[in-house]
Structure formats: structure tokens, C-alpha cells
């Protein structure tokens, strides 16, 4: 079993303000749960977020699946984030050449850099992705997660690719706050490990998604945060299901402190 520092202790070690903020929220709300609000209607997202907001440290969006996107929706999402004290993570997985991701992050109809606290990126195309996102995000005090491993079956990420991604993260801690991963990859206590592909029962969907339990992800594999979509969004009782995931992940974290 891996023994770890508490979120508070780790927060104190951070020079990156976004990581510090997230550790603070996690400790205060006793939540290392991120909900993935993968709905296509803005009202569905806002209703979900108002229910689960008190129980999550962050809400993850796929803004490009929203069919009735408007600036008003973003305003309301930001109000929810303030009301319930959570961060906003746009799961855009930027992956193109630097100049293109810069435009995608800053422009288009979504203007992601104006509202998302955190974004993520695949570094498959080289150093330009991170350099470009940094050019925009750094001065706005935003954070970035690098996709170092994936949850889906047959994904083409290799151990070498993962190791190179970890190195990039460790060298860019002014902007990179951690990883999207399945396993604990770095011993640096200031880097966060966020894991998607989580449900209360191990399993899979019919399109290659693979699920692990919160205990497996947090206490056995030593990751920090679980990201849960359909396990919560498709539940008949969203609030109590979110609470069950929150408690399961937070108890698993507490076990590592003993
Ligand atoms: O719980 P689910 O399966 O309904 O949703 C999981 C969410 C989805 C995916 O786009 C995302 O997590 N995801 C990611 C992320 C967060 O980058 C990486 C990955 O490897 N697997 C994965 O499912 O919104």
C-alpha cells in the first residue's frame, strides 16, 4: 500500500496556484470526485450541476456536444461554480499543432480560455501543443492536465509515450497540474492524478470504455481523483449516487493516509 501526504500538505508544496486551489477545495469539501456532465442540452447540465455541485471538486464538460450553446449558459455555469465552489474542466483534449490548438482554445464560438479553469491535452504532436496552450493559459492562471494513459480498450498509448508525457509534465509545472491516467505515474506530490473510467462496479460499455471501482483507482493504484460520468448522470437518484461516489473515493484516499 502506498502512503501519501494529505491534500492539505500537498497543497502547501505547490507553487502552481491552480493546483493549490484544487487541493484546497478537495480538502474543504472532502471530495476527490469530478463529475463529467456529458449532456447535450444546457438545461440538463445546469440541473445536474446544481444537484451534484456540493459534492464535487470539479465539473468536467465537453462543450462541443452542447446543442444549444450560448454565452448565457456559460454565465450560469460560472455562477454555479461560484455557488457550489467547484472548478470547471473543459475536456477538449487538444492535440493538433501549436497554432491550431491556440485558436481552438482561445477562439471559435466557445472561447474556452475565457471560462475553463482547466483543460487537457494529448502531447502526441510534440512540444507545440503545450507551448501554445501555455501562451494563452499561463497569464490567465489556468491549468492543464496531460493525457498520459487512457481508459479505453485497445488505445494506442505506449509505456514510452506515457513516460515522455510524465517528463513533460514535470518540466512544465507552471502550467501543467497533473495527468489524466489510470495509474500513479509520478512521485511528485504537486502533480495530480485524475482517473476516468470509474463506476461502483468494474465493467465496460459497448464502445470500449472500461470501468474500475473508486477503491481500485484511489487506494490500490494511488491516483488522487475519480472522474465519473454515466455512473452518476444516468442514475435515477443523482444526488445520492454522487454522494456514494464521493464517499467511496474520499474513504479510499483516507486509507492511504494511515
Ligand atoms: O464515466 P463515463 O464513461 O460516462 O465518462 C467518462 C468521461 C468521458 C470521457 O471523454 C472522459 O471521461 N475520459 C477521459 C478524459 C477525462 O480525458 C480520458 C480517458 O481515458 N477516458 C475517458 O473516459 O467524458
Image (cartoon, rainbow, N blue to C red):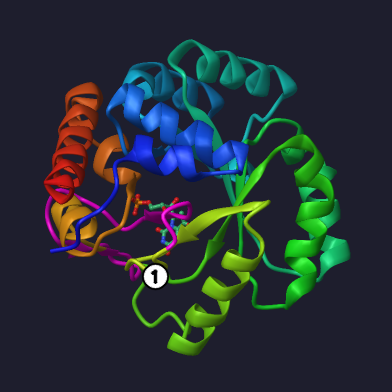
Could you say which quadrant of the image residue 70 lies in? top right
Q: Does the magenta-highlighted stretch encompass residue 195?
A: yes
Q: Does the magenta-highlighted stretch encompass residue 62?
A: no
Could you say which quadrant of the image residue 173 lies in? bottom right
Residue toward you, 9 or 139: 9
Could you say which quadrant of the image residue 202 lies in? bottom left
| Residue 238 seen in the current view | yes
Ligand 1's image quarter is bottom left
- Establish if 217 lies above or below 68: below
- Establish if 156 lies above or below 64: below
Crowding around mark 1 (Cα neighbors within 10 Å: few <14, some 14 to 19, many 20+) is many
Q: Residue at x 24, y 22 (%)?
A: 239
Residue toward you, 65 or 162: 162
- Establish if 205 lies above or below 66: below
Q: Position of residue 254 (x, y in %)?
A: 16, 41
| Circle 1 residue | 185
Q: Residue at x 46, y 60 (%)?
A: 180
Residue toward you, 256 or 134: 256
Q: Position of residue 6 (x, y in %)?
A: 29, 41
Horizontal side of 113 relative to 65 (left or right) equals right
Horizontal side of 97 relative to 41 (left or right) equals right
Residue toward you, 100 or 121: 121
Q: Residue at x 22, y 54 (%)?
A: 218
Q: Residue at x 38, y 83 (%)?
A: 154
Q: Position of residue 151 (x, y in %)?
A: 36, 67
- Establish if 35 lies above or below 146: above
Q: Secondary structure at mark 1?
A: loop
Q: Position of residue 175 (x, y in %)?
A: 67, 51
Q: Which residues are magenta?
A: 188-210
Amino acid at each position: 500500500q502506498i502512503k501519501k501526504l494529505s491534500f492539505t500538505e500537498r497543497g502547501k508544496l505547490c507553487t502552481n496556484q491552480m493546483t493549490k486551489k484544487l487541493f484546497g477545495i478537495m480538502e474543504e469539501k472532502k471530495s476527490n470526485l469530478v463529475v463529467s456532465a456529458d449532456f447535450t442540452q444546457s438545461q440538463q447540465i445546469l440541473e445536474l450541476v446544481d444537484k451534484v455541485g456540493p459534492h464535487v471538486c470539479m465539473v468536467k464538460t465537453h462543450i462541443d456536444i452542447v446543442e444549444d450553446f450560448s454565452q448565457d449558459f456559460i454565465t450560469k455555469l460560472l455562477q454555479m461554480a461560484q455557488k457550489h465552489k467547484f472548478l470547471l474542466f473543459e475536456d477538449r483534449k487538444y492535440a493538433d499543432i501549436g497554432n491550431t490548438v491556440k485558436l481552438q482554445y482561445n477562439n471559435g464560438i466557445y472561447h474556452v480560455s475565457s471560462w475553463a479553469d482547466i483543460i487537457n491535452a494529448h502531447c502526441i504532436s510534440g512540444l507545440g501543443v503545450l507551448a501554445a496552450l501555455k501562451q494563452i493559459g499561463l497569464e490567465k492562471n489556468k491549468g492543464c492536465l496531460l493525457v498520459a494513459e487512457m481508459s479505453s480498450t485497445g488505445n494506442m498509448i505506449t509505456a514510452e509515450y506515457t513516460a515522455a508525457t510524465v517528463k513533460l509534465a514535470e518540466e512544465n509545472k507552471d502550467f501543467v497540474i497533473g495527468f489524466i491516467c489510470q495509474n500513479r505515474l509520478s512521485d511528485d506530490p504537486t502533480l495530480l492524478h485524475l482517473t476516468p473510467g470509474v463506476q461502483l462496479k468494474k465493467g465496460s460499455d459497448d464502445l470500449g470504455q472500461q470501468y474500475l471501482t473508486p477503491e481500485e483507482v484511489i487506494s490500490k493504484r494511488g491516483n488522487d481523483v475519480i472522474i465519473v460520468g454515466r455512473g452518476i448522470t444516468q442514475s435515477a437518484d443523482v444526488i445520492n449516487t454522487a454522494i456514494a461516489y464521493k464517499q467511496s473515493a474520499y474513504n479510499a484516499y483516507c486509507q492511504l493516509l494511515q
